Image (tube, rainbow, N blue to C red):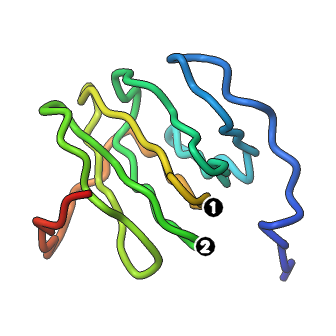
Amino acid sequence: MHVIDLRATAGAPIAEFGSIGASAAHLASGGGDAHVYVVQIGAGGVIGPHDAGFDQLFVPVSGEGWAAGDDGVRHSIGVGQAALITRGERHEKGSETGLIALMVQVEHLPALGVQRSTSRT
């Protein structure tokens, strides 16, 4: 068993997609193309629009921010919530105040019992 301090995990800056003030640290990979990252988005930061290469679960563990899908509508997201993004979906993420999130990428991640939120920023 290992305890990982996500706040102290140094990530590499995300330079793609016109991103600003965001970094990611690759935490783990599993069999069958599964990856886990800790993503840090600073105040005013954004990971710009891009197509998802995998199904993705974006789970804030600290702070709050937003996620937008194909329609570009920003939905508020914070601790206790998650954004599910399907492979190929154009999306972006950001935060006005700062956010740390786990990002789980899996080739196929079916959503069971998902309740969709209608909150927007």
The residue under label 2 is which amino acid type? Ser
Q: Residue at x 63, y 61 (%)?
A: 100
Instruction: Report crowding for label 1: few under 14, some 14 to 19, many 20 or more residues within 10 A (C-alpha).
Output: many
Image-quadrant location for residue 44? top right
Q: Looking at the image, can residue 101 be seen?
A: yes
Instruction: Report crowding for label 2: few under 14, some 14 to 19, many 20 or more residues within 10 A (C-alpha).
Output: some
Image-quadrant location for residue 12? top right
Q: Residue at x 29, y 33 (%)?
A: 87
Quick one: quadrant of the C terminus?
A: bottom left
Vertical placement of residue 106 versus 46, above or below: below
Q: Residue at x 43, y 71 (%)?
A: 78
Vertical placement of residue 5 versus 90, above or below: below
Marks 1 and 2, how far apart at CA: 5 Å
Q: Which residue is mark 2?
A: 62
Which structural element holds mark 2?
strand
Q: Looking at the image, can residue 37 be seen?
A: no
Q: Which residue is mark 1?
A: 100
The residue under label 1 is which amino acid type? Ile
Q: Residue at x 32, y 58 (%)?
A: 83
Cβ atoms under marks 1 and 2 closer than 8 Å: yes
93 sits to left or right of 2: left
Front-lying residue, 80 or 33: 80
Image-quadrant location for residue 8? bottom right
101 sits to left or right of 25: left
